[in-house]
Image (cartoon, rainbow, N blue to C red):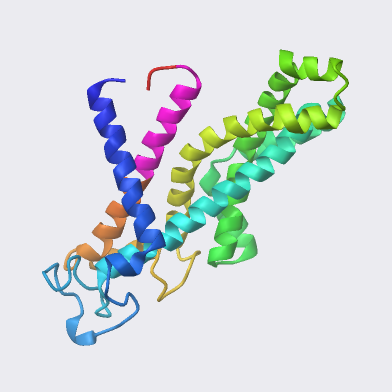
Amino acid sequence: MSVSRRVVLGAALAFLAVVAAMALFPGLIAHADPLRTDVRAALEAPSAAHWFGTDQSGRDVFARVVHGAGGSVGIGLLATALALVVGLVIGALSGIAPRPVDAALMRINDVLMAFPEFLVALVVVAILGPGATNVAIAVTIAAVPVYVRLARVQTRTFALAEHVEAARILGVPRVQAFTRHVVPGVLGSLSVLATIGIGSSILAIAGLSFLGLGPTEPVPEWGLMLSGGRNVLGTAWWIAVFPGIAITLTVISATIVGRTLRARAEGRTA
């Protein structure tokens, strides 16, 4: 890996560490109450008192961005983890299932993969209704097909590996050989893909929240904050710009780390 790429990777990891600290310990980073309103301080520009300025209700934007990391990143991580688990189960079962079952599962999966993930998530939220929980379910459903496809391919690959065949020859039960030797390998491949998927999930959640389909006011959430500041960009740009920067840098950083891990897993130079 070149020096410049190491610097970029280091910067991405450092930023993700900051985001993790914001999500886990927001009160230590931002001391102001993200829900406290002060009409007299509404729409104040960034200053020493309010680093990122204040919004229409006089709430501290810096505090809301910091506290919003828990919701935006937390829902993204949850959706990615659920998609990984569901994709692993369905893909692994499809990989060892009889041909008719495998074909049926893959046709359904192909139909879902034919549509953009955000569009699938949007349709699911439209059916389930708005809310943080429904957004997490929607993003999970939208992301599952990618994990199913990879899990199926990897299951078939690992099932034919020499160490798995050796375990069967030694009399290890089929189910035990599958859970001990095939599933861990498939899970490792999906975990690398999930590091990239985290960024996509966070972006999808922010997009749904921006459309008013995610958490509702006064919950601090990056996409919702971005939506709240779009009508005052000309006079109070900071309300939308700072959560927008947080979303952008988080997605870019997660993607950089994910692509680096995937390159290393494939034996390539990142």
Q: Is 42 on the left-hand or right-hand side of 177?
A: left
Q: Nearer the viewer, residue 1 or 172?
A: 172
Residue at horizontal 64 percent and vertical 63 percent from the top:
128
Q: Residue 24, percent across and down?
A: 41, 61
Q: As displayed, is residue 49 above or below residue 137? A: below
Q: Residue 28, percent across and down?
A: 30, 67
Per the rendered image, the range of residues in magenta is: 251-267
For the C terminus, the quadrant is top left
Rendered image quadrant of residue 78: bottom right
Q: Is 81 on the left-hand or right-hand side of 249?
A: right
> Is residue 231 at all visible to an observer of this figure?
no
Q: Main secondary structure of the magenta part?
A: helix
Q: Is 250 on the left-hand or right-hand side of 202?
A: left
Residue at horizontal 50 percent and vertical 20 percent from the top:
266
Residue at horizontal 29 percent and vertical 83 percent from the top:
37
**Residue 92 included in the magenta stretch of the image:** no
Q: Residue 17, percent across and down?
A: 34, 49
Q: Nearer the viewer, residue 130 or 36?
A: 36
> Is residue 28 at all visible to an observer of this figure?
yes
Residue at horizontal 33 percent and vertical 41 percent from the top:
13
Q: Residue furthest front?
A: 170
Q: Is 169 on the left-hand or right-hand side of 191?
A: right
Q: How many marks?
A: 0
For the N terminus, the quadrant is top left
Q: Nearer the viewer, residue 258 or 13?
A: 13
Rendered image quadrant of residue 145: top right
Q: Residue furthest left?
A: 48
